[in-house]
Amino acid sequence: MAKRWNNPTGWSEVTAFLKAAGYRVVAIDRDPDGVPPGAEDETGDRPLLERARWLRHCEFFVGLGSGLSWLAWACRAPVVLISGFSHPATEFSTPGRVINYNCCNSCWSDPTLRFNSAFDWCPRHGGTERAFECTRAISAHQVVETIKRIPSFQAAAASSALSRASRSAMERCILLPAVVSPTS
């Protein structure tokens, strides 16, 4: 679960916030499990070029330290990066990083740890209540507050309801990876 947002209500709360703000929310990850309520499902075995097209035309992207976030960054989409298992110095630079330094973090960047290839393994706190706290301790409120700092979000919030409604669906789109938020 290292490359998941382990907050069990995080994605649904962020999606509800974005929908209430008038955004089209689209999940574009490969894994169809865990598409948040209210998000459109564009997951599955699709060409990378199709995902890149979505990212190139979205208003912003919300994701974790994964290939899809790197692709969003490469497509020049503003990225809100929910970060925890890797240190910010090992990821691309974004003003939209959300990380909680008040709990365990950056284990995947720790050269003293040996890793297997499984992302369902917490190297420091596996098998304890602290497992995957690096992302579980990031609240939806923290992510929403980061979204509110995105210039295009601020501009949309400042515009009237009439002008927001006249914007194209693709222009008002934000994208999320489809995720599973484990409760255990």
Image (cartoon, grey):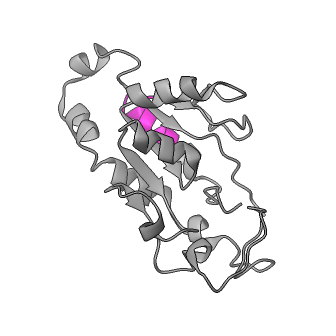
40 relative position to 77: left or right = right
* In front of the other: 124 or 139: 124
* In front of the other: 40 or 110: 110
User: Is 80 above or below relative to 157?
Assistant: below
Q: Label the magenta part by its dominant secondary structure.
A: helix
Residue for point 35% across, 15% down: 168
* In front of the other: 80 or 39: 80
Residue for point 72% across, 34% down: 32
Count of number-bearing discs: 0
Q: Is residue 173 visible?
A: no
Write the start and end of the magenta stretch as one range.
Answer: 14-24
Residue for point 61% across, 52% down: 9
117 relative position to 111: left or right = right
Quarter location, residue 104: bottom right
84 relative position to 93: left or right = right
* In front of the other: 142 or 53: 53
Q: Percent x, y for residue 49?
A: 55, 25
Q: Percent x, y for residue 119?
A: 73, 61
Q: Percent x, y for residue 179?
A: 66, 45
User: Is 46 above or below relative to 3?
Assistant: above
User: Is 102 above or below relative to 5?
Assistant: below
For the N terminus, the quadrant is bottom right
Q: Percent x, y for residue 103?
A: 54, 80
